[in-house]
Amino acid sequence: MCVSTTTARLWVDRWELQQQRYAIDREERFTVVADVVEHVTAENGVPRVLDLGCGPGSLPARLAERLPHAEIVGVDKDPLLLALARACHPEAARYVEAVIGERGWIHALGLAGPVDAVVSTTALHYLPEDVLRHVYTELATLLRPGGVLVNADHLSHEGACVAEIATFVGTRRAQRQRAFDHEDWEAWWSAVENEPELRGLCAERRAGKAAGSNCPLTLGRHVELLSEAGFGPVSPVWQVGSSYVLVAVRP
């Protein structure tokens, strides 16, 4: 289904605001992800980048601005968010509807060869551990040697005390930035359901929606799974509270 540019921009702008409630220092985090991709592709005239869980194209739009010659593929399972991405950021990436981790999802991307970077923002924590383990293994074979996986996400801590402190630090940071003044996740989705132009896509989304994981993995467990998949080294390069940019290098 096609969406008008005017409608897409309205809802993507509202999406950007509500996401600030959850992704602490969101713009800085996007900038760090772009910094990493720029660094590892500095000698590549046409960087090849895959964005996992691209949503309405927020990260591809920023990467395309920084790296205008990059070939970016965004993948997501949500037909509504993909329609908004195609209407609002059509030149930033090629968008593919697929379920990350399902059989054949890599083939559905239509990639011509290895990629330089795989990026993701607040998407991989929805995957159960067994699925994530398999996805990491697949991505290790998809990346070229020296390529990177860059995961900007909410990652929990091993100890309850430290996890509580990290959550508090992130919450206070968001309060100082007045991020909590924006509508929340539930309010955005409730409002978009009433947009006449998007009702068909909302119905399609509801029909295909599956429950996500209720047990987000810790930072340490992500590092372990990436190492088991063949990545190394693996380390955070940015952190505020429980929000991280985790980088894993393909040897």
Image (spheres, rainbow, N blue to C red):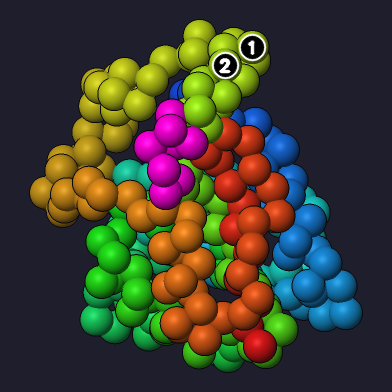
- Asked whether disc 1 touches disc 2, contact meaning CB atoms under 8 Å apart, the reply is yes
**Which x, y percent locates residue 161?**
43, 33
Decide if residue 44 is on the left or right side of residue 32: right
State which quadrant residue 234 falls in. Answer: bottom right
Label annotation for residue 133: none
User: Magenta stretch: residue 6 in it?
Assistant: no
Q: Which residue is more in the foreground, 33 or 183? A: 33
**Residue 138 higher or lower than 132, as above or below:** below
Type of amino acid at the residue the image marks with label 2: Arg
Type of amino acid at the residue the image marks with label 1: Arg
The C terminus: image quadrant? bottom right
Q: Which residue is more in the foreground, 77 or 221? A: 221
**Which x, y percent locates residue 213?**
23, 52
> What segment carries the magenta color?
157-164
**Which x, y percent locates residue 192?**
31, 26
Q: Main secondary structure of the magenta part?
A: helix
Q: Residues within 10 Å of mark 1 (few under 14, many from 20)?
A: few
Q: Is residue 52 visible?
A: no
Q: CA gap, disc 1 to disc 2?
A: 6 Å
**Residue 96 higher or lower than 115, as above or below:** above
Q: Residues within 10 Å of mark 2 (few under 14, many from 20)?
A: few
Residue receiving disc 1: 176
Q: Which residue is more in the foreground, 165 or 120? A: 165
Label tally:
2
State which quadrant residue 53 falls in. Answer: bottom left
Q: Which element is circle 2 on? A: helix
Q: Residue at x 55, y 41 (%)?
A: 243
Residue receiving disc 2: 172
Q: Which element is circle 1 on? A: helix
